Image (tube, rainbow, N blue to C red):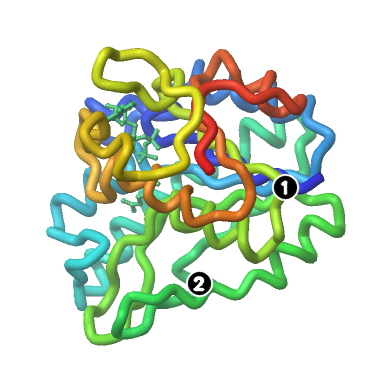
Amino acid sequence: MTTVLKLGGSLITDKERAETLDGTALSAAADAIAECRDDLALVHGAGSFGHHYAEKHGVSVTEGTTDAGDALEIHGSMTTLNRFVLSRLHDRDVSALPVHPLSAGGRDADAALDMPIPAVRTMLGEGFVPVSHGDVIAHEDHGATIISGDEVVVRFAEGLDADRIGLCSTVDGVYDEHGDVIDHIEDFDAVADALGGSDATDVTGGMAGKVRTLLDLDAPAYVFGADDLSAFLSGGEPGTRIG
Ligand SMILES: Nc1ncnc2c1ncn2[C@@H]1O[C@H](COP(=O)(O)OP(=O)(O)OP(=O)(O)O)[C@@H](O)[C@H]1O
Ligand SMILES: C=C(C)CCOP(=O)(O)O
């Protein structure tokens, strides 16, 4: 069983304060991951790390920078967060290794992503847990733009032929207009009105972008909160099922 799991940036950082980790939430997530026996590929979002610098430099999924210093500042904040995640996992004997999208892929002029994943597949085969993240990425005719962790999740899910996908965030699932968790989403238009952006600095689109990308996948995806991470990793179907 191959599982792709994203730890939302909103979950593992304090999105209101620049470059601030939510150590308690990250440790709890690492505890749950340490118990998982699936082949697990992890991705984490940016939260108050990457988004802060992306906004500072005016870089988004469509607006690029040709300034290497600016790109490196965004990337560096993400590798810092990645080291925190790896370190909490290593503390629990999880064999986690980093995968940095900036060094692994690029976009063409139409923004199509080319991110080969043989290295990720080999890591999984050798018993490692690859840990990737949202990042900056070279983008033809744009310099470098942002790739969200959600897009890495989609690439991993397709490339690894994943059986299930989980997005663990600060919300219990995708809410409808009344604030109730939607059980199952099969069609974007049916829920579009209820889907907003993110409630903090976020250059990649919040919940609407998430649902849109997850609907493109063959494998089912689940959006759920921190309390349901163990249930998801042991085969449960918490929160909102997408697809
Ligand atoms: N209908 C909805 N249901 C649930 N959350 C919603 C909805 N509409 C908007 N949101 C917002 O989406 C946010 C979750 O998306 P966000 O991109 O911030 O999560 P994340 O993946 O944890 O963070 P990051 O993008 O930093 O990795 C929630 O904090 C909430 O404010
Ligand atoms: C802002 C950067 C660098 C990546 C954004 O990734 P996300 O938090 O998964 O949307």
- The residue mark sitting in front, 1 or 2, is 1
- 77 or 201, which is in the foreground? 201
* Residue appearing at x 15%, y 58% in the figure: 57
Above or below, comparing residue 1 to residue 185 in the picture: below
Q: Earlier in the sequence, mark 1 or mark 2?
A: 2
Quarter of the rendering occupied by the N terminus? top right
Examine the rendering and report whether any part of residue 48 can be seen. no
User: Which quadrant of the structure image shows residue 69?
Assistant: bottom left
Q: Position of residue 235 (x, y in %)?
A: 75, 28
Give how far across and how far down residue 240 sits, in percent.
50, 27
Which quadrant of the render holds ligand 1?
A: top left
Per the image, the residue denoted by label 2 is 103
Q: Residue at x 28, y 67 (%)?
A: 145
Residue at 34% over, 22% down: 175
| Residue with the mark numbered 1 | 163
- Amino acid type for the residue under numbered disc 1: Asp
Q: What is the total number of numbered labels drawn onto the structure image?
A: 2
Q: Nearer the viewer, residue 219 or 78?
A: 219
- The vertical placement of 145 against 47, above or below, is below
User: CA separation, marks 1 and 2?
Assistant: 26 Å
As shown in the figure, which amino acid type bears the numbered disc 2?
A: Ser
Q: Assess whether mark 2 and mark 1 are in contact (beta carbons under 8 angstroms).
A: no
Q: Would residue 110 appear left or right of 242 to someone viewing this image?
A: left
Q: Look at the numbered disc 1 and give the secondary structure of its residue.
A: loop
